[in-house]
Image: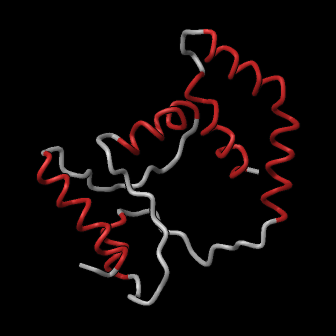
Amino acid sequence: MRVATLMLGTRFLASVGREGLWNARVVRSYRDQWKAKHAETVQRLAATDVELASYTVEDVRSWLQRVPREAPVCSFPPFYGGGYEKLYEPLDTHFTWDAPEYELLSDADADADADVVDVLGAITCAA
């Protein structure tokens, strides 16, 4: 149930407390349909056959150093400034959690490009 709540939260919490008709409509829609949307999300999660063998809260760079080269990798690192910060801001406002620690991609254009290449290279084993 927690995962369903967090999943739905990523869809509407950014609109909570913001000005504008669109934001008000999003919040009202989720408020009015919360029980149905939450139940549907819980049901979909329960029906999936995908299981996580493990989960680690850490920077993708350190994690990629331990992943066997033959293992498949799925990662969503922030390839733009403040990516995770912007994504998690609404969740941070409404939930208490142990946030992961990670190193930001460099802000300087040349360094940021090198950071992206390094992370993608590690994911594709081309590094």
Residue 31 spot, x, y in % from top left: 77, 24
Relative height, residue 98 to residue 38 (above, below) = below
Relative height, residue 122 to residue 119 (above, below) = below
Relative to the observer, which residue lies in front, 122 or 46?
122
Q: Is residue 3 left or right of residue 82?
A: right
Q: Residue furthest top?
A: 20
Q: Residue at x 29, y 66 (%)?
A: 119
Q: Is residue 116 left or right of residue 123?
A: left
Relative to the observer, which residue lies in front, 35 or 113?
113
- Quarter of the image containing the C terminus? bottom left
> Which quadrant of the structure image shows residue 108?
top left
By what rule are the colours in the image chosen?
secondary structure
> Which quadrant of the structure image shows residue 14?
top right
Residue 88 spot, x, y in % from top left: 48, 40
Residue 81 spot, x, y in % from top left: 29, 41
The number of numbered discs placed on residues in the rendered structure image is 0
Q: Residue at x 79, y 49 (%)?
A: 41
Q: Residue at x 64, y 30 (%)?
A: 12
